[in-house]
Amino acid sequence: MPRLPTPLTLPGPGPGPVRRGARRRRRGESATAWAFLSPSVLIILGLSVVPVAWSLLLSFRADDLVTPGRWVGLDNYRALAQDPHFAEAVRNTLLYTALYVPLSLGLGLLLALVLNRRIRLVGLYRTLIFVPFVISATAQGVLFSFILDPEFGAANSALHRLGISAQGFLTDPGQALLVLVAISLWSGTGFCVVVYLAALQDVPASLLEAARLDGAGRWHLLRHVTLPTLTPVTVFLLLWQTINALQVFDLVYVTTKGGPLGSTTVIVYFIWEQAFKNFTAGYGAAAAYALALALLVAVGALRLVRGREDRRLEGAAR
């Protein structure tokens, strides 16, 4: 049997030109991607990364932002530890947070449970509760400054009609911080209501029906079915409200400016006062990083709590 002829093949391109072409395409794609991303990267660097790094360096300097500063190392942080005004600002901030956060979550959950029913005009009620949240804190401060004015405000006028003596409200050192908490609750509770309403509508109906068949009443449904299901949302709101409370500034600036007698001076207002009123920018930057450290600790603690709760729920599901 005669041998078959060997098929004739043409030499193809070597591996070198193929690799070079692929590299050129990848470089072209990378250049195009960076061309689209560069505006966002520049904005992020210019408005977040660079200011954070610069303020960190500033916290180790004695600087008034006008004349040349000098390096002082940890002196600003040592001075903070001994400053009674900073200690007072920390106490006021913690008290404000301790009052505002649990009250906003509790009122938000209560109103969400009430509005999670088929009642007339429920959409209107939800809107009216949420509207204060979208009003700026500056507008809220101006509004309540007029309402709570000790001489001409509507609040004291109403109290006078009820036979109650006039109150100082924002001008009384014993009431000012509590009044700020009440104003914040008026505006901030609406966010908790909306989030809790969304979470309540995601509670599995099968769990509620099974609990009812087992004879559970409303309280047992709330305690053993609804609240455990809302745990992730509650942790999120706790973290969100805590961060907002620790950073409160605009409401204080518009209404009391830290007074009377420093009773409403919070940490962020203290930072602003040191940096832009007393022209001790390095000292203010040190206070800002003390606040940042507190926020990191709060976030870490809440994430740890959420992780433990998630593991507990996963174990219960198994």
Image: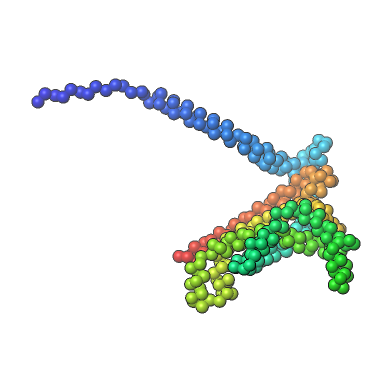
Task: Please state the horizontal and vertical placement of residue 81, each as a whole percent of the image.
Answer: 77, 53
Q: Quadrant of residue 6?
A: top left
The relative height of residue 133 versus residue 278 in the rendered view (above or below) is below
The relative height of residue 222 versus residue 298 in the rendered view (above or below) is below
Task: Please state the horizontal and vertical placement of residue 89, each as a whole percent of the image.
Answer: 78, 56
Residue positioned 73% across, 61% down in the render: 186
Task: Please state the horizontal and vertical placement of residue 230, each as a whole percent of the image.
Answer: 57, 64
Residue positioned 51% across, 74% down in the render: 212
The relative height of residue 23 versus residue 150 in the rendered view (above or below) is above
Q: Is residue 238 visible?
A: no
Which residue is at the front of the view, 97 or 107? 107
Whether residue 99 sits left or right of residue 258 in the image: it is: left
Whether residue 26 sits left or right of residue 103 in the image: it is: left
Q: Quadrant of residue 191?
A: bottom right
Q: Is residue 259 visible?
A: yes
Q: Quadrant of the N terminus?
A: top left
Identify the residue at the far front of this view.
Answer: 120
Identify the residue at the far left of this view.
Answer: 1
In this figure, what is the number of numbered marks?
0
Identify the residue at the far bottom of this view.
Answer: 215
Residue positioned 14% across, 24% down in the render: 3
Which residue is at the front of the view, 213 or 314? 213
Whether residue 228 sits left or right of residue 248 in the image: it is: left
Task: Please state the horizontal and vertical placement of residue 107, each as a whole percent of the image.
Answer: 68, 66
Q: Quadrant of the C terminus?
A: bottom left
Residue positioned 63% across, 62% down in the render: 123
The relative height of residue 268 versus residue 122 in the rendered view (above or below) is above
Whether residue 269 sits left or right of residue 125 in the image: it is: right
